[in-house]
């Protein structure tokens, strides 16, 4: 066990986008950031992105370990957390960030599109929370932060599967917050609005313009905007917050 590590942080989906920014924001000397990543069919690009995240985290004086592991696969999740425990013997922060979209109108939505999104976006956090919370409850301390979305609150045409998963994660957050509060573990969610990442890069110019028109602050969010809220929730300053959803949306939702 590495005695010099004071804080073990786990971030799912840390190779790119919001997850990478969260890894960077939580990276400081004395912290070991563990992240996973997984995009079947594009492993080479994903490994290159993960190597960049590792470098960025290490540049802040933290340790970094990135592992190819699917959050929807129980065995892979167990192996991932086993590595965290073997290295650090503790888990201080878990950020459930990994997420995917498979957009389609409800009438056309394939069962597989529904299942894939729910497996990654909702079952994934369940599996990770279950393992991490056992450790955190024993420690009598821990922070769990789930990345939801404003659409989980307001709905969005063409995203029934994604919206259901994000509404689900908000309910999961509130229930876990109530179950773990007496053990010193807080559970909160961050709900981003429209953030510039690979996930939103695939949207048409028309959809992007319509989104921007709905943002009072007049710009799309950056991954760093979301990471700042996560950093706050993981900090001592957020000790008295649990079961909350912080919307980082430039006022898109208020
Ligand atoms: N981009 C936005 O506008 C926006 C808005 C609201 C919420 N969100 C949420 O923020 C989170 C991050 O989104 P992003 O835009 O950075 O996405 P992204 O597509 O840029 O990155 C997704 C990350 O998740 C990882 N991942 C995907 N499937 C995985 C799996 N099965 N197991 C492990 N890792 C997996 C990828 O490797 C990658 O690191 C997601 O939960 C997303 O739903 C994003």
Image (cartoon, rainbow, N blue to C red):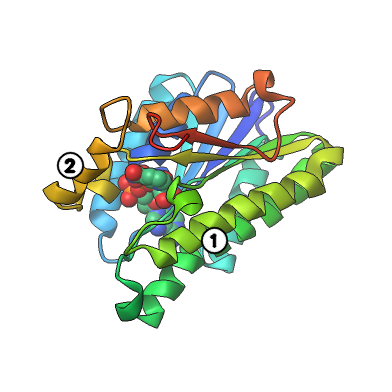
Which residue occupies 63% across, 59% down?
126
Q: For the N terminus, give its image quadrant.
A: top right
| Mark seen at residue 87 | none
- Camera-side residue: 121 or 216? 216
Which residue occupies 73% across, 50% down?
176
Residue 57 vertical placement versus 29 (above, below) = below
According to the picture, the residue beneath numbered tag 2 turns out to be: 209
- Tell me where residue 252 sits by quadrant: top left
Give the image location of residue 175, x and y in percent: 73, 52
Does residue 16 appear in the picture of this structure? Answer: no
> Does residue 19 appear left or right of residue 93 in this picture?
left
Please identify the residue farthest to the left as the structure is shown.
Answer: 205
Give the image location of residue 236, x and y in percent: 68, 20
Give the image location of residue 124, x and y in percent: 54, 60
According to the picture, the residue beneath numbered tag 1 turns out to be: 122
First of labels 1, 2 by sequence position: 1
Q: Residues within 10 Å of mark 1 (few under 14, many from 20)?
A: many
Residue 104 vertical placement versus 108 (above, below) = above
Which residue occupies 20% across, 50% down?
207
């Amino acid at each position: 066990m590495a005695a010099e590590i004071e804080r073990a942080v786990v971030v799912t989906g840390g190779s790119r986008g919001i997850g990478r920014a969260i890894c960077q924001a939580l990276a400081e000397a004395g912290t070991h950031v563990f992240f996973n990543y997984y995009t079947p069919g594009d492993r080479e690009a994903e490994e290159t992105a993960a190597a960049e995240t590792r470098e960025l985290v290490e540049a802040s004086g933290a340790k970094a370990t990135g592992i190819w592991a699917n959050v929807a696969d129980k065995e892979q999740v167990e192996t991932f957390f086993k590595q965290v425990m073997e290295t650090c013997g503790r888990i201080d922060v878990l950020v459930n960030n990994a997420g995917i979209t498979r957009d389609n109108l409800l009438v056309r939505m394939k069962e597989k599109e529904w299942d894939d999104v729910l497996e990654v976006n909702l079952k994934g956090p369940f599996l990770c929370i279950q393992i991490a919370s056992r450790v955190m409850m024993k420690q009598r301390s821990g922070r769990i932060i789930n990345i939801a979305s404003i659409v989980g609150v307001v709905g969005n045409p063409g995203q029934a599967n994604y919206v259901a998963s994000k509404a689900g994660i908000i309910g999961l957050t509130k229930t876990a917050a109530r179950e773990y509060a007496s053990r010193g573990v807080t559970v909160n969610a961050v709900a981003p609005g429209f953030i510039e990442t690979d996930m939103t890069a695939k949207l048409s110019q028309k959809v992007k313009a319509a989104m921007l028109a709905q943002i009072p602050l007049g710009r799309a969010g950056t991954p760093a905007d979301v990471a700042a809220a996560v950093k706050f929730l993981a900090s001592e300053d957020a000790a008295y917050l649990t079961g909350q959803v912080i919307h980082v949306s430039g006022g898109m939702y208020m």
